[in-house]
Image (tube, rainbow, N blue to C red):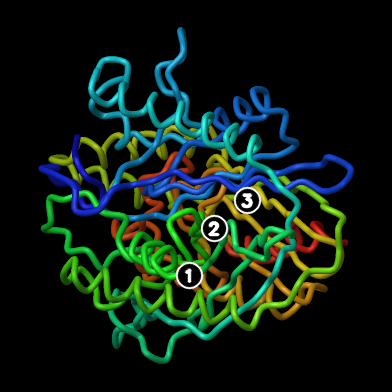
Amino acid sequence: MEILHFYRNNVGVHDPLFVRALVIADATGKSVALVTGDFLGAGCDEIRTRVREKTGVDEVWFSASHTHSGRWLVSTPTPGRLYTDELEWDELTEKGPIAERPEELQWNNGVHQAIDEIVAEAQRHMVPVDLRAGRAAAQVGFNRRLAAADGSIYMGVNRDGPVVPWVNVLSAHARDTGKPIAIYFEHAAHPVTVPHGSNLVSADFPGAAVRRIRKHLGDDVIALFGQGCNGDINSFPLRSTHADADAVGHKLGEAVLQAMEQSNVLKSTKLKLKTVVTELPTRPLPPLELVESLLRDNRGDARRLKQLGKIKTILLRGGTPPSRRFEVHGVMIGEEWCLVGLNYELFAQIELWVAKVAPFRWTMVNSLTNGGRAYLGDDEALALGPKGGYEAGSLPSWSGHETMSPSLGSPAVGCEAIVKKAIVELWS
């Protein structure tokens, strides 16, 4: 199977990919399974439902590291449903149903089974613990959005742009020995240090960070990486060497160990879980005259013509483009600690905002959680329209990631306020 993304043949493994699980329960029995995986992304509705039914946990989070040297995990095909991801792109299904690709179906089903098994195993090995929260300075990447002379956005190293300059850590320590059992750590940066010319599978810098942590604390410690608000952050150096990815991960792992050393025990013992679901509108479709012009200009591109045909049909019917399902998930421990999960790739500004306004001493934010198919820029980026760059651009520019999405365009200006309102609802 190919490595994504960029698409390239897979000829071997530089370092293995993992799924990992941490199950937390309070004295009342309320429980949550935090599952992480070395995937570009994942369709998560089926995973969450199945694990809840099989294990009895109250809630399941599935967070993808977003390594660009791995695979996309799709939902399991069932009779009558060839494509079962809750958010589907044509480009992910061009090869036909996964059921018709035996090697991919075998791998995909094997991963699903592994997720079920590790959550059940985590449940069997639960022991009383003290939870500790900490934060340490860390930066393994840079903001990647730069403005050209005409105001259009392109990718580069923006040393003055916003980043999340820390790593957040939640560690579980056996109450009888004080020994760490599991460390859940979060930092915001695309795992793109591995070169796109490499044909070897890799977890990129998050995998190297895990190896550094386990080398120091022991191989019996489970270290789980949760991706932060990385939508506008690339790891550095970009697409260079596997050795650089290992060095970047080593640096992050050292910061995790430092955060653990200066962490504080959470005194609260009550676990609260909450999910807020809302809809994000899509920006208005381009006028019909522009669509007709684009249809003429792109006669040799079948995929663009297909997308433009969908847009034209809606315009002729006087309709509006499809909205997006947006989910915010919260795991809160008393009034001390909160983990916010978001199902899109959001910009670093959102994580910085959460750290500033949330009524908790400690906060963590995961993007690409319980879904995560695409980018969600802030209003400033979305307001640029065609000049918004890869993460936020719109037609007539084809460079925007969402121009080919099922919603037929990027999110609308005003979505930032909807996102923030949904996050605040977690604790209001």
The residue tagged 3 is 280
- Whether residue 26 sits left or right of residue 216 in the image: it is right
Q: Earlier in the sequence, mark 1 or mark 3?
A: 1
Amino acid type of the residue that numbered disc 3 sits on in the rendered structure: Leu
Amino acid type of the residue that numbered disc 1 sits on in the rendered structure: Ala
Picture residue at 13% right of the left edge, 40% below the top:
300
- Label 3: few (<14), some or many (≥20) within 10 Å? many
Label 3: state its secondary structure: strand
Amino acid type of the residue that numbered disc 2 sits on in the rendered structure: Ser
Q: Residue furthest top?
A: 79
Q: What is the distance, in whole Å, between disc 2 and disc 1 at their CAs?
A: 9 Å
Q: Residue furthest front?
A: 177
* Residue 171, percent from left and from top: 63, 64
Q: Nearer the viewer, residue 193 or 22?
A: 22
Which quarter of the figure is the N terminus placed in? top left
Q: State if disc 1 and disc 2 touch (CB < 8 Å).
A: yes
* Residue 404, percent from left and from top: 36, 45
Above/below status of 118 relative to 408? above
Picture residue at 27% right of the left edge, 69% below the top:
246
* Residue 67, percent from left and from top: 34, 55
Picture residue at 25% right of the left edge, 38% below the top:
303
Label 1: state its secondary structure: loop
Q: Earlier in the sequence, mark 2 or mark 3?
A: 3
Which of the numbered marks, if any, corresponds to residue 69? none
The residue tagged 2 is 367
